[in-house]
Image: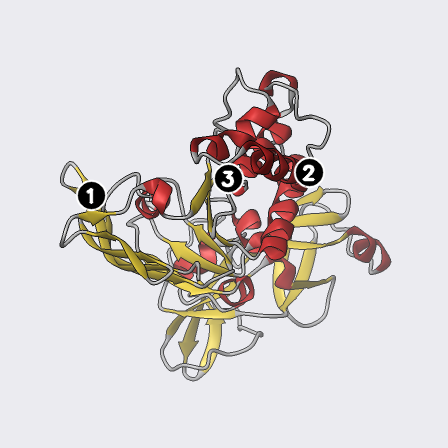
Amino acid sequence: MANIEIRNVSKGYGGRAVLSNLSLELNDGECFTLLGPSGCGKTVLTRLIAGFEAPDAGTILIGGNIVADAATGDSLPTDKRGLGMVFQDYAVWPHMTVFDNIAYPLKIAGIDAEALKRRTLESIEMVGLKNLEERLPSQLSGGQQQRVALARALVHEPGILLLDEPLNNLDANLREEMRFEIKALQQKLGVTILYVTHDQEIALGIADRIAIMDADGRIRQIGTPEEVYEKSVDDYVFRFLGIANLLPVRRRNDDLFLGDTGEAWTGETPATTGDRFTAGFRPSDVILAREGEGLPGIIRRASFLGAQIDYLIDIAGTLIRATLPSHEGVARDLMFVENDPCRIHLASVQWFPGDIVVTNRV
């Protein structure tokens, strides 16, 4: 088994706590993404799992075996934990060929020459670098160098692969390509992956499950990409994942209104009691019309982005974003321009109790 258990782990530096009493479990064979803002402790947790650092408190287990225990001071060396790791900065040796870079872990482990060559060539082919084994890193693109780092992490057949922001230095097209390839490799090899990132798109696209961390190093929600996106446990998670629209809603005499205005709320109603709510929804949840029923709005910005149109809309003093496919905008006469009036309906709403500070007011 290649599952990972983090039990009540804490870590700090210079009197400042980075992780406090954190617990987490990764299942054998899953791709688990740790998603959070820069500085929240994602990389620290990865280094603790890898054995580069020791926890101040708590226990870490891999495959049911304790690899780090703060109470006893025991810590299994990194090379004994059955891990592969890929960093943001490729970390390939510039004086070694592709073959030698990838074969290095096997050479250190004392693997015989025949097996070393076979496994290295298999790894080279697996990441799409066949016939490039004699090139130096300076002769490779950034994406190819990252493939070298990935093959080197996989060549000794680890049960767990730790990926710490491995695609940050690639351009958008390469990031997308490598994201799909990493997922395909994980499914083919059955390796357990912990993928650390602050990139929401990569996290949602690659993960079987996601843990959302806040700036204080706390885990706010764990779930599938669909669960955390469509059923966020709080407004922090909702706002962190993608573009979030927030509208204040008030209940007065059993009727709902937009904030403190006299504009009636026409969407679905919150299931809980109370007088103050915030309606959360995505740009894709906005259904636009030129007239009729629905919330009244004014188009403040219209941006044609090729395949889709992005609108900034003033709803009772609060700005929201709406998107729709360009072909739909043309077919339904929804090609608005600045200062056009419109009406909106909402396909889906996530309700949050109380007032959430909305900074996108007119």
Q: Quadrant of residue 116?
A: top right
Say what amino acid the circle numbered 2 marks.
Glu
One can see residue 300 in this view = no
Q: Are marks 2 and 1 in contact (CB under 8 Å)?
A: no
Looking at marks 3 and 2 on the same chain, the residue that comes earlier in the sequence is marked by 2
Q: Position of residue 157 (x, y in %)?
A: 52, 47
- Dot 2 lies on which element? helix
Give the residue at mark 2: 125
- Dot 1 lies on which element? strand
Give the residue at mark 1: 12
Q: Indicate whether 4 appears above or below 162.
A: below
Going by the image, does 86 lie left or right of 322?
Answer: left
Looking at marks 2 and 1 on the same chain, the residue that comes earlier in the sequence is marked by 1
Quick one: 81 or 258, which is closer to the camera?
81
Q: Quadrant of residue 260?
A: bottom left
Disc number placed over residue 153 in the picture, else none: 3
Q: Residue at x 54, y 31 (%)?
A: 103
Q: Residues within 10 Å of mark 1 (few under 14, many from 20)?
A: some
Say what amino acid the circle numbered 1 marks.
Gly
Q: Residue at x 68, y 56 (%)?
A: 341
| Spatial CA span between label 1 and label 3 | 28 Å
Q: Quadrant of the N terminus?
A: bottom left
Q: Position of residue 305 (x, y in %)?
A: 72, 42
Going by the image, does 156 lie left or right of 43?
Answer: right
Looking at marks 1 and 3 on the same chain, the residue that comes earlier in the sequence is marked by 1
Q: Residues within 10 Å of mark 3 (few under 14, many from 20)?
A: many
| Spatial CA span between label 2 and label 1 | 42 Å
Quick one: 128 or 225, which is closer to the camera?
128
Q: Position of residue 99 (x, y in %)?
A: 60, 27
